[in-house]
Image: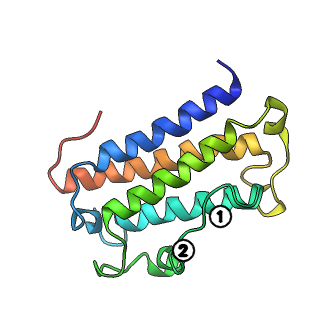
C-alpha cells in the first residue's frame, strides 16, 4: 500500500465511522449536549465540514466545492451555544456536506504523488500541519476527537456505545 492509498483509505474510513455513529440520531438528537457547555453534534459536524473546506481550499483553491452562503457563520465559536433547531441544517444535509467535502478531498489526494505530501501548507497552518501530508493525516485525528464526543452524546441518549 502506498502513502497515497493509505491516506485515502483513512480519509474514507473515518467519515464512515461518523455516519455509523450518528446513524440512529434524529435531528433533535444532534442538538443534545452531554453536559452544560459541551458542543452538540450538529455544531460539531458543521465545524468539521467548514474546517476541511477552508484548509483544503487554502492548500489548493477549488479542491472542496463551496459551501452555501452563510454556512460557515453558523459554526463559529460564537454559535456553539445555539440550541435553536431552525438555526442549523438538518442531519441529512450536514452528512451530505460532510461526505461531499471528504469525497472531494479524497479525489484530490488520489491525484498526488508521494513527493507532493512534502509540499508546505500556507503559513497560517504551519503551526499544526507544516506539510500537505501532515494536514491530510490530521483530518482523521480531528474527526476521531469529535467521534469520541459523539460517543458521550450516545451514552447520554441511552444509545449503545459503538465499537
Say what secondary structure mark 2 lies in.
helix
Image position of 74 with respect to 126: above or below: below
Residue hosting label 1:
54
- Rendering coords of residue 54 (x, y %): 65, 64
In the image, 39: left or right of 2? Answer: left
Instruction: Indicate the quadrant containing the C terminus: top left, top right, bottom left or bottom right.
Output: top left
Q: Residue at x 24, y 40 (%)?
A: 161
Whether residue 82 is situated above or below residue 146 in the rendered picture = below
Q: Position of residue 117 (x, y in %)?
A: 78, 38
Residue 83: quarter of image: bottom left
Question: Where is 159 relative to 7, above or below?
Answer: below
| Picture coordinates of residue 98, whole percent (x, y) | 47, 55
Residue 39 shows up from this direction: no
Query: How far from the left and from the top, in percent, is residue 148?
Result: 39, 47
- Front residue of 18/129: it is 18
- Label ID, residue 158: none
Residue at the top extreme, as displayed: 1
Crowd class of label 1 (few under 14; some 14 to 19; many from 20; radius 10 Å)? some
Determine whether the residue tagged by mark 1 lies in a helix, strand or loop.
helix
Q: Is residue 89 visible?
A: yes
Q: Is residue 154 left or right of residue 18?
A: left
- In the picture, the quarter occupied by the N terminus is top right
Q: In this image, 139 relative to 97: left or right?
A: right
Q: How is the image coloured?
A: rainbow
Residue that badge 2 annotates: 72
Q: Residue at x 76, y 55 (%)?
A: 59
Residue neighbourhood size for the residue with mark 2, other residues' Cα within 10 Å, grouped as few (<14), some (14–19), many (≥20): some
Q: CA distance from mark 1 to mark 2?
A: 9 Å
Are circles 1 and 2 on residues that touch, CB within 8 Å? yes
Amino acid at each position: 500500500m502506498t502513502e497515497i492509498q493509505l491516506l485515502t483509505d483513512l480519509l474514507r474510513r473515518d467519515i464512515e465511522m461518523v455516519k455509523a455513529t450518528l446513524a440512529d440520531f434524529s435531528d433533535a438528537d444532534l442538538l443534545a449536549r452531554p453536559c452544560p457547555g459541551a458542543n452538540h453534534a450538529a455544531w460539531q459536524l458543521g465545524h468539521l465540514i467548514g474546517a476541511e473546506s477552508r484548509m483544503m481550499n487554502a492548500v489548493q483553491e477549488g479542491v472542496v466545492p463551496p459551501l452555501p452562503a452563510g454556512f460557515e457563520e453558523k459554526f463559529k465559536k460564537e454559535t456553539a451555544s445555539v440550541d435553536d433547531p431552525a438555526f442549523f441544517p438538518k442531519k441529512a444535509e450536514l452528512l451530505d456536506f460532510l461526505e461531499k467535502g471528504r469525497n472531494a478531498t479524497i479525489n484530490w489526494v488520489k491525484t498526488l504523488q508521494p513527493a507532493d505530501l512534502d509540499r508546505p501548507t500556507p503559513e497560517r497552518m504551519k503551526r499544526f500541519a507544516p506539510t500537505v501530508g501532515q494536514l491530510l493525516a490530521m483530518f482523521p485525528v480531528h474527526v476521531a476527537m469529535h467521534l469520541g464526543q459523539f460517543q458521550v452524546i450516545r451514552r447520554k441518549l441511552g444509545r449503545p456505545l459503538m465499537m
